[in-house]
Amino acid sequence: EVQLVESGGGLVHPGGSLRLSCAASGITVSGYYMTWVRQAPGKGLEWVSVLHIGGHTDYADSVKGRFTISRDNSKNTLYLQMSNVRADDTAVYYCAKAGAVHLYCSGGTCQDYYAMDVWGQGTAVTVSS
Amino acid sequence: DIQMTQSPSSLSASVGDRVTVTCQASQDIAHYLNWYQQKPGKAPKLLISDASNLEIGVPSRFSGSGSGTHFTFTINSLQPEDIGTYYCQQSSTFGPGTTVDI
């Protein structure tokens, strides 16, 4: 059975840092696109970041330059390093595994398309002074 | 960036009703559109991938269709356990969600 377990959430002051972890079992994180998705209180889902199999990373504009996604293959764990956090980073953070990835080009631009087929239970981050 | 719109934002229906949610992409995404169900306090669950591919274990009353920029998600014969919020998604963008209650 594939399982993702997040940890590391908690209370952090504005401008502070926090590292979230996502321990995987039943899969190897290096063999899949792995993502972070967050949900602010009472709000919808927001994609945060993706780590490609080859190591390429991508980020939502709202976190670019402040958050870093990475993985430790020896620990089979995905991370999200959060720095210079703001009040609007308050959310439940989910890690999720992507299934099959498809490259599709339209209008001169190409993009990877994927679904998140396995999710963790989430870890809550509160940014407050 | 591709934008996703979803409608309605909420709906109320009766047990046994047919429920339909639509999702529109700002540009052609072929059939690469996914649907998730989220119940309060729980992680999202993938129901349908690639517009119409029902995930293993998902009841057949759920279905999806569409391609290009316009997509539809349907629950045939709404059940009490279907209460929750439904999101469409293409890779790095989620729709705003549709809350379904009875």
Image (cartoon, coloured by chain):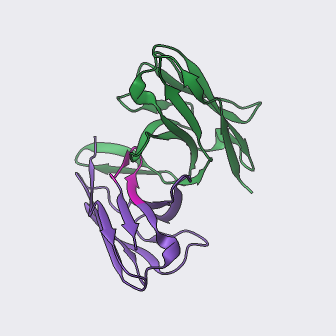
Chain colours: A green, B purple
Q: Is residue A45 left or right of residue A26?
A: left
Q: Determine the residue positioned at 51% across, 59% down.
A: B39
Q: Is residue A63 shown to the viewer in this render?
A: no
Q: Which secondary structure dominates the residues rendered in magenta? A: strand
Using the rendered view, name the quadrant where residue A110 is placed: top left
Residue B92 vertical position relative to residue A9 in the rendered view, above or below: below
On whether residue A105 falls in the magenta region, the answer is no
Residue B12 vertical position relative to residue A126 in the rendered view, above or below: below
Q: Is residue A77 left or right of residue B89?
A: right
Using the rendered view, name the quadrant where residue A69 is placed: top right
Quadrant where the C terminus of chain B lies? Answer: bottom left
Q: Determine the residue positioned at 75% across, 57% down.
A: A1
Q: Position of residue B32 (x, y in %)?
A: 39, 58
Q: Position of residue A85 (x, y in %)?
A: 46, 20
Q: Is residue A17 left or right of residue A24?
A: left
Instruction: Name the one closer to the observer, B10 or A57.
Output: B10
Q: Is residue B6 shown to the viewer in this render?
A: yes
Q: Position of residue A104 (x, y in %)?
A: 37, 51
Q: Position of residue B45 (x, y in %)?
A: 54, 59
Using the rendered view, name the quadrant where residue B101 is placed: bottom left
Residue A37 vertical position relative to residue B51 in the rendered view, above or below: above
Q: Which residues are magenta?
A: B86-96
Q: Determine the residue positioned at 62% across, 47% down.
A: A121
Counting every numbered tag in the picture gives 0
Instruction: Name the one closer to the observer, A12 or B2.
Output: A12
Residue A46 vertical position relative to residue A82 in the rendered view, above or below: below
Q: Determine the residue positioned at 37% across, 44% down.
A: A111
On whether residue B91 falls in the magenta region, the answer is yes
Quadrant where the N terminus of chain B lies? Answer: top left
